[in-house]
Image (cartoon, coloured by chain):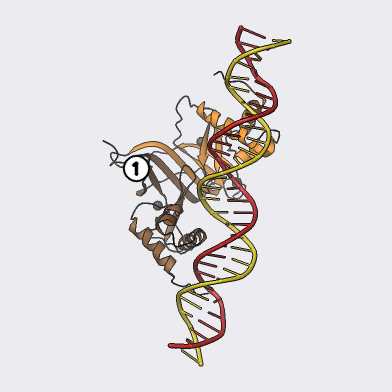
Chain colours: A orange, B brown, C yellow, D red
Amino acid sequence: MNKRKTQSKKAILECIQRTGNYGLKSDNIESELPQFNRVTIYRILQSFIDDGIIHKVISDDGKSYYFKCKNCGEKHFHNHYHFKCNICEKVECMDNNIDVEVPKDYKIEHVNFWISGICNSCKK
Amino acid sequence: MNKRKTQSKKAILECIQRTGNYGLKSDNIESELPQFNRVTIYRILQSFIDDGIIHKVISDDGKSYYFKCKNCGEKHFHNHYHFKCNICEKVECMDNNIDVEVPKDYKIEHVNFWISGICNSCKK
DNA sequence: TCCTTATTGTAACATTGTTACAATAATACG
DNA sequence: CGTATTATTGTAACAATGTTACAATAAGGA
Ligand SMILES: [Mn+2]
Ligand SMILES: [Mn+2]
Ligand SMILES: [Zn+2]
Ligand SMILES: [Zn+2]
């Protein structure tokens, strides 16, 4: 039942650390780490989510992006948005918290906020 | 070059009208209208989007949902969120507008805001 | 070092969506 | 109305993304 520290987990974690505030798709990891199998990468990413190390966000074209968590423990909480620049294609995890009001008697369990546009460095 | 009013377009439009404020997935339409081909349904939905009749939103599990537009013309503008109830599975287009602030020199081109949780009728 | 079993690789499959091309049916026009 | 034009549709084939079952491998405790 004990988790094992494997080469693949180390390598994938390092990928994620290196990207800082930006997000990664699983196929980004695949091409950076071709020695590991696609299925393995999916499994490890899921286990990192379960451990509160990363969070997954769905883009406005249905792709999955993975981001480092900052202060997540057992439960993820991410009421912020993610911004994809349509020019440089970088995806940033934005710290601005969004307070959404849902109607009375609605209960929020999960949010997925995505914005696409032009980032500051691509704007002239 | 002229658009033609076909059986399939009429039937799909009626599906969408009937759902009111709720969203549909393309496979919902497929099963309601088995006489039409999958590809045709995708094509018609895309043409409705181009005409400003419906808008497409991506759920937090990567599925595409289609919603009636209220006042969209050439350009879509939808700074509202969509709420999926994890119990009854209905997806509602919510009218509350969300004002997001992006950092200086960022430009918003498109938003996709999704919330899942429990709706009022499923909550006791 | 050896054993147990957590982890990985492989193959096969599912879902969602797209493309190319031939067949069909809306519409315009005589 | 009948016919021609071509917008639209159906079909098959493909691509991208993700999941599952099961056999092979390797992490780490004894
Ligand atoms: Mn984030
Ligand atoms: Mn909407
Ligand atoms: Zn950019
Ligand atoms: Zn509900």
The correct choice, above or below, for C11 with respect to A8 in the image is below
The correct choice, above or below, for A106 with respect to C27 in the image is above
- Tell me the quadrant of the picture where the N terminus of chain A can be found: top right
Establish whether ligand 4 lies closer than 8 Å to the Cβ of label 1. Answer: yes
Left-right relation of D25 to B8: right
> In the image, residue C14 lies at what x, y percent?
52, 45
Residue B70 visible in the displayed image: no
- Toward the viewer: A84 or D14? D14
> In the image, residue A7 lies at what x, y percent?
67, 25
Counting other residues with Cα less than 10 Å from the Cα at mark 1, is it few (<14), some (14-19), or many (20 or more)? few
> In which quarter of the view is residue A3 placed?
top right
Q: Which residue is mark 1?
A: B88
> In the image, residue B3 lies at what x, y percent?
48, 72
> In the image, residue D28 lies at what x, y percent?
63, 14
Left-right relation of A94 to B29: right
- Inspect the image, locate mark 1, and give the three-letter code of the amino acid beneath it: Cys
Number of callouts: 1
Q: Chain of mark 1?
A: B
Residue drawn at x 68%, y 39% as measured from the top left: A31
Q: Is label 1 in a helix, a strand or a loop? A: loop
